[in-house]
Image: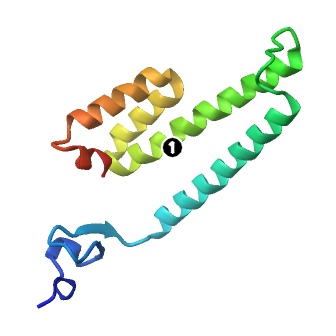
Amino acid sequence: MDIRDRKPKECEEKLIVASNTPESICMNKLDLKTLATAIFFLIFGMFIFAYLSSMLVRYPLFEFKVDEINWTREWLYMTILDYYGAALSLGAVTLYSEPPFYAVLWISGFCLLGSPICCSYVIYRYGNRKSYSEFLL
Protein backbone atom coordinates (compact mmCIF):
# COMPACT_ATOMS: atom_id res chain seq x y z
CA MET A 1 0.00 0.00 0.00
CA ASP A 2 1.43 3.37 -1.03
CA ILE A 3 1.65 6.11 1.62
CA ARG A 4 -0.47 8.36 -0.58
CA ASP A 5 -3.32 5.85 -0.26
CA ARG A 6 -3.26 6.01 3.54
CA LYS A 7 -5.04 8.76 5.41
CA PRO A 8 -3.98 9.18 9.03
CA LYS A 9 -6.84 10.07 11.37
CA GLU A 10 -5.47 13.54 12.06
CA CYS A 11 -5.26 14.20 8.30
CA GLU A 12 -8.70 13.02 7.24
CA GLU A 13 -10.00 16.57 6.76
CA LYS A 14 -6.63 17.94 5.72
CA LEU A 15 -4.36 17.95 2.74
CA ILE A 16 -1.17 15.90 2.95
CA VAL A 17 1.97 17.66 1.84
CA ALA A 18 5.22 15.79 1.19
CA SER A 19 3.25 12.55 1.00
CA ASN A 20 6.24 10.54 -0.21
CA THR A 21 7.69 10.53 3.29
CA PRO A 22 6.41 8.75 6.37
CA GLU A 23 6.63 12.05 8.25
CA SER A 24 3.90 13.64 6.14
CA ILE A 25 2.99 17.15 7.10
CA CYS A 26 -0.72 17.78 7.43
CA MET A 27 -2.04 21.18 6.46
CA ASN A 28 -5.53 22.60 6.79
CA LYS A 29 -7.59 22.94 3.67
CA LEU A 30 -7.83 26.50 2.46
CA ASP A 31 -10.89 27.94 4.18
CA LEU A 32 -12.54 31.32 3.72
CA LYS A 33 -10.88 32.89 6.78
CA THR A 34 -7.41 31.84 5.61
CA LEU A 35 -8.06 33.07 2.09
CA ALA A 36 -9.39 36.42 3.33
CA THR A 37 -6.35 36.84 5.59
CA ALA A 38 -3.98 36.03 2.74
CA ILE A 39 -5.71 38.50 0.41
CA PHE A 40 -5.69 41.21 3.10
CA PHE A 41 -1.96 40.82 3.74
CA LEU A 42 -1.21 40.67 0.02
CA ILE A 43 -3.05 43.96 -0.58
CA PHE A 44 -1.63 45.54 2.60
CA GLY A 45 1.92 44.52 1.65
CA MET A 46 1.49 45.86 -1.88
CA PHE A 47 0.17 49.14 -0.47
CA ILE A 48 3.14 49.49 1.91
CA PHE A 49 5.56 48.70 -0.93
CA ALA A 50 3.93 51.27 -3.24
CA TYR A 51 3.87 53.91 -0.50
CA LEU A 52 7.52 53.27 0.36
CA SER A 53 8.50 53.43 -3.32
CA SER A 54 6.74 56.75 -3.81
CA MET A 55 8.31 58.04 -0.58
CA LEU A 56 11.80 57.18 -1.78
CA VAL A 57 11.18 59.07 -5.01
CA ARG A 58 9.61 62.17 -3.40
CA TYR A 59 11.66 62.28 -0.19
CA PRO A 60 14.92 60.32 -0.48
CA LEU A 61 15.98 58.75 2.81
CA PHE A 62 19.61 59.73 2.59
CA GLU A 63 20.62 63.35 2.80
CA PHE A 64 18.54 63.61 5.94
CA LYS A 65 16.43 66.75 5.83
CA VAL A 66 15.24 66.86 9.41
CA ASP A 67 14.82 70.64 9.23
CA GLU A 68 12.26 70.22 6.44
CA ILE A 69 8.84 69.57 7.99
CA ASN A 70 7.33 67.75 4.97
CA TRP A 71 10.26 65.31 4.77
CA THR A 72 10.07 64.61 8.51
CA ARG A 73 6.28 64.20 8.55
CA GLU A 74 6.21 61.85 5.57
CA TRP A 75 8.95 59.64 7.01
CA LEU A 76 7.14 59.58 10.36
CA TYR A 77 3.99 58.32 8.59
CA MET A 78 6.04 55.71 6.72
CA THR A 79 7.66 54.51 9.95
CA ILE A 80 4.27 54.17 11.66
CA LEU A 81 2.81 52.30 8.68
CA ASP A 82 5.83 50.01 8.55
CA TYR A 83 5.67 49.21 12.27
CA TYR A 84 1.95 48.46 12.29
CA GLY A 85 2.36 46.34 9.15
CA ALA A 86 4.85 44.18 11.03
CA ALA A 87 2.78 44.18 14.24
CA LEU A 88 -0.38 43.12 12.38
CA SER A 89 1.51 40.36 10.60
CA LEU A 90 2.76 39.00 13.91
CA GLY A 91 -0.75 39.50 15.25
CA ALA A 92 -2.16 37.26 12.52
CA VAL A 93 0.27 34.50 13.50
CA THR A 94 -0.77 34.98 17.12
CA LEU A 95 -4.46 34.89 16.26
CA TYR A 96 -4.05 31.55 14.49
CA SER A 97 -1.84 29.94 17.13
CA GLU A 98 -3.17 31.12 20.51
CA PRO A 99 -6.54 30.91 22.25
CA PRO A 100 -8.69 33.94 21.32
CA PHE A 101 -8.51 35.71 24.71
CA TYR A 102 -4.72 35.46 24.89
CA ALA A 103 -4.38 36.38 21.23
CA VAL A 104 -6.30 39.62 21.82
CA LEU A 105 -4.06 40.42 24.79
CA TRP A 106 -0.89 39.75 22.81
CA ILE A 107 -2.08 41.75 19.79
CA SER A 108 -3.09 44.67 22.02
CA GLY A 109 0.40 44.58 23.48
CA PHE A 110 1.97 44.52 20.01
CA CYS A 111 -0.01 47.57 18.92
CA LEU A 112 0.05 49.61 22.14
CA LEU A 113 3.38 48.74 23.79
CA GLY A 114 5.51 48.05 20.74
CA SER A 115 8.48 45.89 19.94
CA PRO A 116 9.35 44.78 23.52
CA ILE A 117 6.03 42.88 23.60
CA CYS A 118 6.63 41.52 20.08
CA CYS A 119 10.03 40.22 21.20
CA SER A 120 8.49 38.80 24.38
CA TYR A 121 5.95 36.88 22.30
CA VAL A 122 8.68 35.41 20.10
CA ILE A 123 10.59 34.32 23.21
CA TYR A 124 7.38 32.87 24.73
CA ARG A 125 6.51 31.03 21.54
CA TYR A 126 10.01 29.65 21.14
CA GLY A 127 10.17 28.61 24.79
CA ASN A 128 6.93 26.60 24.54
CA ARG A 129 8.12 24.50 21.59
CA LYS A 130 10.22 21.38 21.72
CA SER A 131 11.93 21.96 18.38
CA TYR A 132 12.57 24.77 15.96
CA SER A 133 10.16 23.27 13.40
CA GLU A 134 7.35 23.43 15.98
CA PHE A 135 8.22 27.09 16.55
CA LEU A 136 7.47 27.83 12.91
CA LEU A 137 4.25 25.81 12.74
Q: Amino acid at mark 1?
A: Ser
Residue 60 drawn at (x, y percent):
81, 27
Residue 69 drawn at (x, y percent):
87, 15
Tell me the residue at 20%/37% (across/down).
128
Report whether 109 appears left or right of 26: right
Residue 3 drawn at (x, y percent):
16, 83
Quadrant of the image containing the N terminus: bottom left
Report whether 47 appears left or right of 6: right
Tell me the residue at 59%/34% (across/down).
84
Give 63 or 51, whichever is nearer the viewer: 63
| Quarter-of-image position of residue 72 | top right
Tell me the residue at 41%/46% (across/down).
93
Report whether 9 appears left or right of 134: left
The residue tagged 1 is 89
Q: In what element is the residue under mark 1?
A: helix
| Quarter-of-image position of residue 73 | top right
Give 67 or 44, whichever is nearer the viewer: 67
Residue 25 drawn at (x, y percent):
25, 66
Number of numbered discs visible in the structure rendering: 1
Residue 133 to residue 58: above or below: below
Q: Residue furthest bottom?
A: 1
Label 1, residues with CA under 10 Å away: few <14, some 14-19, many ≥20: some
